[in-house]
Image (spheres, grey):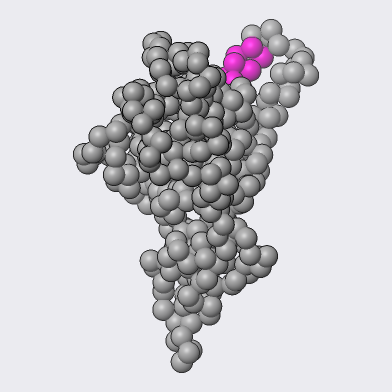
Amino acid sequence: MYDIFLCGIFIYLFMRKKLTILTPAFTFIIISLFGQTPNSFRNEDYDVRKFRIINMKVPTPQKHLSLDNVHAFMVVDARPDTVPIGFMQKHPLNHAFIELNKSVRQETENFINDYFQFSKTDSTGIVVMILKKMWLTDELDIIEDDFLNDKKKGRGREYTSGIKMKAEFYYKKEADYYPLYRYDSVFTDSFSVTVNGPYYIHDAIISSLSKLSSIDNKLSDLRNKRKLSWEEIRQHKDDDFNIPVLKDTNLRRGVYATFDEFKNNNPSEINFEVRTERMSDILYIKQPDGKEFVARDNWGYCDGHKIFIRSSVNFFTLQRVGNAFYIYGSKTLNRKHPSHLKLTLMPFQLDWDTGNLN
């Protein structure tokens, strides 16, 4: 739609004879907008690392809380990909990665240090947040998620916009770390990430901290509670990605019946063939007697070099970045006309907790 708008301006100015020579800048805009679409954004193998990057600023907290038993706060970014914070899947000028102006760790830490007024006594402890997930998306599957906005969800539309937030909190006193609590929730609204992204981040961080203020007066009584070393916490953090599909040198060829088979690099079927039809990919399992049957419920497959995940009626290439996997694919098959089906392509990140895309 935006391309059509710009084209209309160009034609209008040309017909009015007020545009006789295209400036280099304007020429570049026209070539960029019209030239890249057919060759890139319609190709399901498009490299997600080539998507545009849009920086986002988190709003300043409007209120401040005091903590009497905490004198500092530290954030550790333990997400699978520590650079982006989400996708703009409904952006009018094609899709884009979202990044914060500074690193996610630093922006989150700065926000929290602004939100809390800490004790000025160094003898109090430090709170450590291990950030496991903070991901903005316009493709949240609300049927998949048990909790939305910290409350048990009701049934509604299938996809919506919002943020997934997951973190673990520890209290550090001298060399010891005491587990405090885990936070795992989803915040949604009717507004897209393009419009409401900064406020999703704002609300998710504040919600994750709500329990901390309520247990502040109990932090001094943790001496007799279970305690951990930093090495134990670090090992626990690293174990999330200590899985065969990320660690093995070679990928095993075969069909993954489940998400666990994918994670373990252990496909259960090795004799198969994928045939591409006009609007779908069909996976056939070959049996010992030579007969074939269509596998409809498998999670994905590996050809020995690349991994493909089933989504909608197709298989899409999983593209690894760090410990994260992305696809440029589709979750739905749109019917614009009774006789015309169309795949709507957009980027997604693989959720390590569920094996789904968002």
Give the residue drawn at x 41%, y 74%. 294
Q: In this view, does 86 lie above or below 334?
A: above
Q: In this view, does 304 lie above or below 86?
A: below
The answer to whether residue 51 is left or right of residue 296 is right
Q: Give the range drawn in magenta.
A: 5-14
Give the residue drawn at x 64%, y 12%. 13
- The answer to whether one can see residue 84 in this image is yes
Give the residue drawn at x 57%, y 63%. 244
Q: In this view, does 153 lie above or below 116?
A: below
Q: Is residue 339 above or below residue 111?
A: below
Total number of numbered discs in the rendering = 0
| Nearer-the-camera pick, 282 or 9 | 282
Within the image, what quadrant is residue 208 found in?
Answer: top left
- The answer to whether one can see residue 328 in this image is no
| Nearer-the-camera pick, 268 or 128 | 128
| Nearer-the-camera pick, 68 or 148 | 68
Where does residue 292 sit, x and y in percent of width and height? Answer: 45, 82
Q: Which residue lies furthest to the bottom in this view?
A: 289
Give the residue drawn at x 53%, y 19%. 122
Quadrant (top left, top right, bottom left, bottom right) of the C terminus: top left
The answer to whether residue 173 is left or right of residue 51 is left
* Residue 157 located within the stretch drawn in magenta: no
Where does residue 159 sit, x and y in percent of width and height? Answer: 35, 40
Where does residue 73 sit, x and y in percent of width and height? Answer: 51, 25
Where does residue 178 sit, x and y in percent of width and height? Answer: 44, 38
Q: Residue furthest front?
A: 224
The answer to whether residue 351 is left or right of residue 49 is left
Within the image, what quadrant is residue 49 found in?
Answer: top right
